[in-house]
Amino acid sequence: MGELKAKDSVKLNYPVDFVYRTVTDIANYDKWWPSEVKSELEYLDPAIIGTRINVQNGPFVKWRSVVSGFKTNRLLAVDYVDGAWTGKTAWRFEEIPGGTKLTMEIDISCNRLWLKAVSRVMNLSRMHSKQISRIFGNLGGYLENNYEEYKKQNNGTGGISVSGIDHLILRVKDIARSALFYRDVFRVENTSHVSGEITLSFGNQKIRLVKETGGFTPDKNEVIFRMSLNTPPEKVKSILKEKKVEVLPGPFYDSAVNTNNEMFFIKDPDGYLIALRSNMNS
């Protein structure tokens, strides 16, 4: 006893991209979730995975959730990691004729003795499905109220909607040296090795390192990419000093001056400029 398993679906007459954007907009859950369910962002990770949410359902049932995975327009996976419940949930998005099939799957266990006792006399899975049915209804109304704004932003007047940058390509002299630099300084993951090339994963974005040939070489000072820091700037500078990475004075372009977020610069082994921006006060 004490387990809650359910799989509930609804057809929504809206594009899958619109539904996905809405369901993954965690900060606005209070606009369409039932009033008894309160959610609060504890930490919003720029890479989405790792985002932490505190949830309360009624006066006594509280738990912490962490986003564990996502696939654009297909999946949002959320793990319950602490509190009244532990286990896994997933929102699944399927494009169908005329709209979107949205499915909510849940497989969790009670993490409180009193809740386990309640589960012996009440069908928690059935109660959950009833609540999800209400949530689906609220979501449908919220989508209807915001659909015109969505169409204005996606009216097909020449613009192409994108969900983000898949990857950037950097041409470097020594692929292994550059990969070691990024792994050592930023703790990124080497995700693939293809034909001598290495792909570095920064959350949901990637940088592919390829061998610089005798052809055109970009002016490294004109190739600048920016990273948002979740670590306090002074701590970052201390770490860089330990790793013997020089912090450059800057700014190297006008918009680098930002009074709300401290920004400074370093260079990678090939001279590419990296702007480091504090994400602590954004």
Image (cartoon, grey):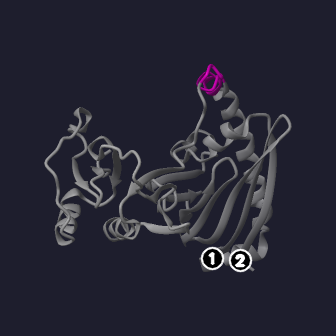
Q: Quadrant of residue 5?
A: bottom right
Observer-nearest of 179 and 117: 179
Q: Is residue 278 left or right of residue 141?
A: left
For badge 1, the amino acid type reads: Trp
From what the image shows, is residue 23 above or below residue 253? Answer: below
Residue at image mark 1: 114
Distance from the alpha carbon under mark 2 to that under mark 1 = 10 Å
Observer-nearest of 237 and 126: 237
Mark in front: 2 vs 1: 2
Counting from the top left corner in percent of width and height, residue 141 is at 70, 33
Q: Which quadrant of the rendered structure holds the C terminus?
A: top left
Residue at image mark 2: 2
Q: Residues within 10 Å of mark 1 (few under 14, many from 20)?
A: few
Counting from the top left corner in percent of width and height, residue 213 is at 42, 55
Q: In this view, does 81 lie to the left or right of 173?
A: right
Kindly identify the residue that appears in the image at 67 percent across and 27 percent down.
147
Q: Give the range drawn in magenta.
A: 148-158
Q: Is mark 1 on a helix, strand or loop?
A: helix
For badge 2, the amino acid type reads: Gly
- Residue ranking furthest to the left: 249
Whichever of callouts 2 and 1 sits on the residue coming sooner in the sequence is 2
Counting from the top left corner in percent of width and height, residue 163 is at 57, 42
